[in-house]
Image (spheres, rainbow, N blue to C red):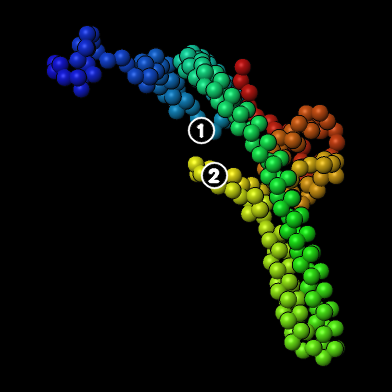
Amino acid sequence: MSDSPDNPRAVVGGNNPPEPTLIEKMTEAVAPIVKDLDALAVKANALPKTIKSDDENLEVGAVVKEARSISKRVEALRVETKAPIIKAGKDVEAFFSVPADRLARIITTLEERGTAFVNAKAAEERRLREEQARIAREKAEEERRKADAAANAGRVQTAARAEGRAEAAEDQARRLEMAAEKSNADLVRTRGAGGTVATAKTKQDIRIVNFAEADLATLRPYLDRDAVLKAARAWLKVTKGTEALKGFEVFDDVKASYR
């Protein structure tokens, strides 16, 4: 054996066979069950494809019972094999949840502070721009009145200058109004020297304000069919099918049973 540091088996005990993999361990453990399952499959394949008598139905029932017995052994072995893996997974989750939860609390707390700040800042920026736009509009109206008065007095050049100032003020007002309509992100975005960008992110959301009045008919195309069926089965469990439910049918689901 090479004593190269790149050889992981070049250590004391390196001549020992490697530990079997999980698949190899499970294959060995399930081997007796597989043997019984193979024998059961032979019995099942020999059964009639269509049951024509009570005796044949009893033969089928006997194989079903044996299959259930083997199934319980498979399930018990699965649970036994998986238990340490589940525990290890829980241990990993518990270990890393401590720093993860601390970080989540820090992030949530600081983002809540930032949200309050950017909302206030955006509102103030919008208010200031709307106020500046209002002042510009008033200036435009004042300059236009001056232009009209000068024109009426025959002071053409004075009127032209006043009209120019009025148009400039109106243009400024339009730009300020457009700026006031910008998104919160555009209103509050700042970039720090270290590269951090502070901004706002807006997305539409919805919440239930009155569940009794919720328009489920409109939501029908977006409802999960399995979730609706689950709710209907909960309703059936409570009502025992003594009431009618529009769009649903209560029926007796009859299946063969062997014990």
- In the picture, the quarter occupied by the C terminus is top right
Q: Residue furthest left?
A: 2
x then y, percent, for residue 233:
74, 33
- How far apart marks 1 and 2 lie (CA) works out to 76 Å
| Marker disc for residue 136 | none
In the rendered image, is residue 27 in sight? no
Residue lying at 44% horizontally and 24% vertically, measured from the top left:
41
Name the amino acid type tagged 1: Lys
Q: Secondary structure at mark 1?
A: loop
The residue beneath circle 2 is 192
Residue 172, placed above or below residue 63: below
x then y, percent, for residue 80:
49, 13
Name the amino acid type tagged 2: Gly
Residue 189, placed above or below residue 113: below
- In the picture, the quarter occupied by the N terminus is top left
Q: Residues within 10 Å of mark 2 (few under 14, many from 20)?
A: few
Give the camera-side residue of 21 and 211.
211
Give the camera-side residue of 165 and 153.
153
Residue lying at 74% horizontally and 35% vertically, measured from the top left:
231
The residue beneath circle 1 is 49
x then y, percent, for residue 167:
73, 77
Quarter residue 179 falls in:
bottom right
Q: How many marks?
A: 2
